[in-house]
Amino acid sequence: MGRQEQAETALAGAGGEMRALYARMTLIRRFEETLLELFAAGKLHGTTHTCIGQEADAVGVISCLEPERDVVVSNHRCHGHYLAFTDDVDGLLREVMGRVGGVCGGKGGSQHLFRGNFYSNGVLGSTVPVAAGMALAEREKRTGAVATVFVGDGTLGQGVVYESLNLASLWELPLLVVVEHNGYAQSTPSTLQLAGDVEARAAAFGIAASRHDTTDVVEVQAAAREAVDHVRSTGTPYFLVLDTYRFSPHSKGDDFREPDEIAARRLRDPLTVAAGLVDEAEREEIATLVERRLDEAVEQALAAPAPAAAATEPASR
Amino acid sequence: MSVRCGQALNAALHEIFERDERVYLIGEDLLDPYGGAFKISQGLSTRWPERVLTTPVSEASIFGVSAGLALRGYRPILEVMFGDFVTLGLDQVVNGIAKFRAMFDEQVTVPLVVRTPMGGRRGYGPTHSQSLEKLLLGVPGITVVAPSECHDVGALLSEAVDDDEPVFFIENKLMYGRPNRRPEGGRVDELACVEGEGPYPALTFSGNGFGRADATLVTYGGMLPVALDAATQLILEHEVFTEVVALSRLLPLDLEPVLDSLGRTGSLVTVEEGTLTGGIGAEIAARVQAEAWSDLTGPVTRVAALDGIVPSARSLEDEALPGVEDVVAAVTALERVGG
């Protein structure tokens, strides 16, 4: 067993489920901090949207899914979902860095990922009907799969979301809509872009819903378990709203929020909240394993060549 | 009398549903006895109730739902009631359906067919009469097919369903009620006709057995009968011989049949029902001048709708849309023809 495999095994569950939840969140946090460091160092270009502060959502919800069977559709802020679902550090890092070995050959980059049953796309809201169609496909195939689509509160401004909620309810589709409500649509606070009640939007379509203001991964997991069980056992959709907060900027350097506001929310950092799940020695061990895995991944990614453009026909024919 | 194009499409849908259970039909007002606004889907919901999904009036969503089905192993056909409504689903087309295969590094396909009627001359007015397929021609990653009444419309639809690429299948509204005039013995009425090879072939018509002629008309879909009438009138009234090329696939564009014809004529007129600016005629003209400059005896001429709305009143609609007289005038105005 290579060093990397050892680290993966240690992170993936030996030591119990609580340790696995904590370890997965740590991996996502450090992965994205590493990306921002690489950007700052000029070692990658393009864009990235990190979910730093929201890791409990990705890890808690996806811990209730079966990657071999269930489908996940994510958005521009997809790294946490992707890592929680696939554990594919190398494929994602190289994809974002534009290196050979990227999970989509460097074509997709940060926000357009595909692997197995995981899909992400970058236009807000457009993913919801696609996920509904996938839920329909799985229902027709009788696989028992749940299709989960992650959106944010900003996406609630898109009309196609409501067309799709209507359809999902009408056709009884096994669709789980997870709203990660971080209070901002890019730079615009919810107070300037969202009217009415968020859960009531689902109720209007006869869709079961619940809302949880928590950054505790164990609480998120419990809420998600109920939601996933509902979808799987009834075959009908569920609308799960998770109040959260993003510490990092929307993208890279574009943050104009009050530092005090961010500092206050830091007290509810999901990693701090989850620290009690494992003892100090384990936390240190996890931190070491994560650093080792990421260092190795970065080193190998930097050494990997850039993908060459395939020979294409001239544009005129 | 041969079957009408609408009947041929309906029969093809029944045949497709019979042979491939991965095919689903999605769209508005599909259920019998209504069977779709233009009745092309009639009978399907009775025979396959589980595979015909009538939807709310939610084009943006049903484009996405169809994409999701296609990504997960099905071969959906999406019926969009009027081509004008394609605009409501365009985000799904441009940012999803057309891109998934390439941006996910060839690891997925989106075998989706979007069937939709386009075209005017029925008095439906500005938002139900347009020929908007030109909007799709700038979207790499999709295939746009627009059969004419002389193509094997059923076979083309069947081919589209078997295609692993997303295909827009543009059905001209007037074509539905017209006979599917397939070439017989190499002829359609008085004109010689040759059908190209391969998928989505072009048809080339000639009034003088493919001898030297004065101009090539390139067209597609509902404009073919207009172009053929013009070709006949040009022979009878002006003693001018033309060839008419009817493309069935507009994207990707294969101009081989046009270049071939141009070798015998030296002049090109493009004929389309959509508005002039940014139309397919402009694209064809640009490519032909680059590839066959030495064959051309003069500039390429475009015949198209006026850059404006398609008005409702018949007199105004006729004025806005290109007709036989417009095509005849364009050909007789060519320098070489004696204009």
Image: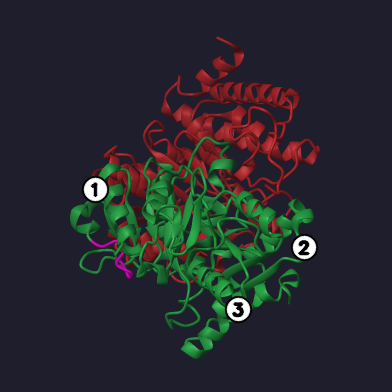
- State the green chain: B
In the image shown, does B240 or B229 lie closer to the viewer? B240
Q: Residue furthest left?
A: B46
Which subunit holds the residue at mark 2? B
In the image shown, does B193 or B127 lie closer to the viewer? B193
Estimate the x, y position of residue B14 in percent, counting from the top left.
27, 52
Can you see residue B320? yes
Question: Is disc 1 in the same subunit as disc 3?
Answer: no
Which subunit holds the residue at mark 3? B
Q: Using a 10 Å C-alpha cutoff, classify the residue at mark 1 as few (fewer than 14 neighbours), some (14 to 19) or many (20 or more).
A: few
Q: Nearer the viewer, mark 1 or mark 3?
A: 3
- State the red chain: A
Q: Using a 10 Å C-alpha cutoff, classify the residue at mark 2 as few (fewer than 14 neighbours), some (14 to 19) or many (20 or more).
A: some
Estimate the x, y position of residue A316 in percent, counting from the top left.
70, 49
Circle 3 sits on which residue?
Answer: B326
Q: Quadrant of residue B58?
A: bottom left
